[in-house]
Each structure stands twice: as C-alpha cells, then as structure tokens.
Image (cartoon, grey):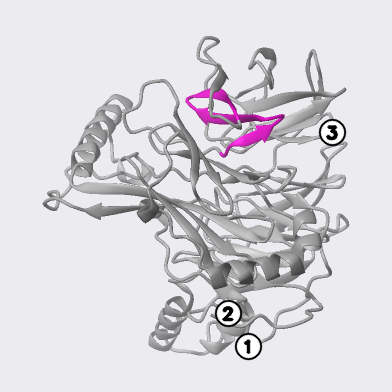
Amino acid sequence: MFPPSSDRILRVSLSSMLLTAIATFTFASSTFAADWNQWRGPSRTGYLESSPELIEELPKAGLEPAWTSGEIDSARSGGWGSPVVADGMVYLFTHKKELVGDPPPPRKYPWLAPDKRGNMTDEEYEQYEINRRNEDEEHAKAYQFREFVMAYDARTGEELWKNQSDSTYTRFPQSGCPTVVGNRLYILGAGRQARCLDVKSGEQLWQTKLPGEFRDEYYQASVLVEDDIAVFNATNLFGLNAQTGEICWDTAEENIKGTHASPAAWKHDGKTYLISVIAGGSTVCLDAQTGDQIWKVDSEGGHASPIVVGDKLLVYGNSRKKGLRCFQMTPTGAESLWVFQRVTDKGSTPIVAGNAVFVQGERKLACVDLETGSQLWMANLDMENPQWGSPIAAGKVGFYAYDGILAFSLKTEEFEQIFDAQIDRSYRLVPTSELRARFQMDETGLDAETRKEGLKKYQQEIGKHGPLRCATPAFADGFLYLRLKDGLACYDLRASRPSQVSQR
C-alpha cells in the first residue's frame, strides 16, 4: 500500500463537502439508479435503460453547458480516457508530461502513416519502427511524466479532489477509464501499476505492480470488477483481490495475452465467468475466481470490447471479413449464430439496446437485429473518417461523438436523427446547420476567396473545443458528459428541467 502524501491530494474544503452532501441528498435516488460507473456503462453494453425524457431539438443559438471543467491535458500527452459517473461524481484519468531537461533534438524517425512509407519493404519498415521506438525512448528522458485521477461534482463541475502520482513513458499514454464500485475506484496506471483509490477523498488505498516485462508498453483496457475480483488487462490478464490488491491469479502460465479490449462478465446459473478478446483474435471464457480457461472460440475479434447480453456474446472485428459476430454461450463453449459484414472499425464498440445492435464503422451507422444479424437500417455519418470512439445510448436515444455530436433515435424501423451538433468556442452545443448557415458554408454563387474565408472561420469556431476523438461520452440521469480536446463538459439534455444550473 502506498498512500499519497498530503501535498498530492487536494482535499475537499468544508464548504465543498457541505455542497456535495446537499447535492448527494438531492440527487441520490435518481443518480445512483442511473450511474455510468465504468467503461460502456453499468452493464458494459453501451446502454443505460433508465433515462428521463430528453430534448428533441437544440435551440438555434445552441445549448449552454451545465458546466465545463477548465483546461485538461488531452490526446497524445494527456491520453484519450473517457469520463465515468457514479453517485453524483464524475471521474477522469489523464496524464501530463513536462520538459525537465534540454529539449530533445529533431526526430530522425517520426511516425509514418501508411501513405508516407514510400517503397519501404516490410523488413525496412520493421527496422524503421525499431529505430523510432529507440529514438522516442531516448527523447522521453528529457521529460517528467505524471498521471492524475480527478473527481468533479456531477452537477456543478466543481473539482472535488485530484490524485497525482509519478508515471512513466509509454509509446501512447494509458487511456483506460476508471471503474467505480462502492467506495472504491480502480485504474491501471502506466508501467503496469494496478491502483485503487477512495472515491470520496482520492486517497490511494493500494497499489500493486503487475509482474512481467515492461519497456514502453501501453494498455488501454479498463478494469472489470466482479465478485470482489478486479481484473486488469496488461499483456496477460490478472485477477486481484479488490479489497487488498493481492494477485489471486494471472494467465501468463497459459500464455493468454490480452489486447486493448476491455473484458466483460457473463453470469450463468449462479456462476460468474470472464469474457475477453485475446491476442490472435480469439475470445476466451475464464473462471472469475481462479482465472482458469473454460473455453476458447475463434471470434475474429479486434480492439473493440466484447459485449455480453444474457447468454449471447458479440465480438466486433477490425475488417469487413471479420465482421460483427454473435455467439450463443454455454459453460462448454460458444456456437456461432450470425456474422454481419457491412461495416468495420479499428476499435469502436457497438451498443446493444433491447433486441437491437447499433454498430458504427466506415462513416456509417447500422442497426442490426440481435437475434438474426439482419440489417434493419443503415445511415451515413457526415464526419471525417470517424474511428475508435464508441457510441452510447440511454432510454430512447443514442449518441456518437467524433467531429461533433450526433443524437439519434433507437427506433429499429428506420434511422431518425434527433440532432447533429458542433461545440463552438463558448462550449455551446449548436446545430451544425446553424453554424454552416452563419458562415455561408452552403451558399451558392460565392467566389472562391469568400468560400475559403467562411470555411476558415467555421473551423476556428469549432476546431479547438470539440469532442476528443477516440474518447467516449458518459451519460447519467439526463446529463451527457463529454471529454473535449481541452477539458470536460456537461450538458443537461432533459426535456423538463426543474431548475437551471449556474454556469461556470
């Protein structure tokens, strides 16, 4: 156990505690019932069944945020972690690197996109990547790395506490989501550090260094907690005692290696199993208490997290051939039911709501029948190459955040858009059509220079404050929580609002 020193925890003031107590009393009944306490929501299906009625359109001038957090490091230096909401508090895991030595020299081996690799052979590119990794590691010596877990009041955005700890260089920053169960928060830190914090104070309760080699590896999967076992995915899968941090089991001996996909729980006949996509695209079923492998199925999985609904398993691959696959699970194995192969994505995880699956990929959004795998509808997304980020849904409404925010109906008969919006420089959620009209984006007869100037102003209005790509929203009790490029924002989407929250 490594409790942080007092200067590493920003304690809640007496007045803040009083406000929090009042807010908790006011919202306890509804908030607790509608928490988004972990990656993909309470059931890890991306769907929250309980929700108040939501607005059907945005004001033309835009919807003001209930609150914004202020600047938070994001993307390459701060990570892509998504917010979670539990018992009236919002939690976020992020990072920061600070230059402490001489600035490193210009890079000789920058990252190369596939279209920038010229005529490199596979062997030449492999060597290039070795050189790039070595150079990145050398450059990292000039920086100090820290990671943070932050807690905010879910209704006011007041920062309640911040836990800061020393971190380490990884090729990409750790970007898993916190998992909140009871009065404890679980997170996998950089360098294979499993951590547990007190949700009210941010005090660290325990920290366990997961065994295994580490150089600069990063792990994006979020922690799963079931039956007092906290499951961490860091090369192998590890089951830790959720109260003490003691390692109960790991899958190194069985050579079961994870991906960036987060595990899910399957409960069958009173027993809890763990379902995880592993290296090579297979999916395994493990005993939650012992980590023993029960069965393995060739599921063609990628980085998307598996979804468990009853005894059905959904796995989304990263190519059309691999597709979205559905299996019927039993304690002895998993039988393929259907494959849907009309979309694909590198890491987006679908929504399951009722008897429908909503899956995003290749600038499309599809609705698929859970029982048969047949397509119910397909819609095009007016977004620039959306990928990695996952849609979510609550009640009767789905949300997808990438360039902007798309809200759509969960109807299965046809695609129905509720609103398509951007976030402007004042953090208002503004209908995209209104912004395009303001900057004459769709006017005919304009000369090239006027059109170019309009596009520039439009991009300046929305370019710096929109959703952080690859992060996924959270939803609780009618409020939408978004990780932005420069912070957090909360929007009250309830159709009936008892009172307006003061703006920050």
> Magenta residues?
222-241
Q: Is residue 43 above or below residue 468?
A: above
Q: Quadrant of residue 71?
A: bottom left
User: How far is the residue under mark 3 from the one under mark 1?
Assistant: 43 Å
The residue type indicated by label 3 comes to Gly
Q: Which of 87 and 71 is in front in this view?
A: 87
Say what amino acid the circle numbered 1 marks.
Answer: Ala
Q: Name the residue under label 1.
A: 61
Q: What residue type is labelled 2?
A: Arg
Q: Which residue is drawn at 75% across and 78% down?
A: 57
- Horizontal side of residue 467 vs 55, given as left or right: left
Residue 428's label in the rendered image is 2
Q: What element carries label 3?
A: loop
Q: What element carries label 2?
A: loop
> Do labels 1 and 2 touch, CB within 8 Å?
yes
Residue 150 is situated, as x and y percent measured from the top left of the image, at: 49, 56
How packed mark 2 is, by other alpha carbons closer than 10 Å (few <14, some 14-19, many 20 or more), is many
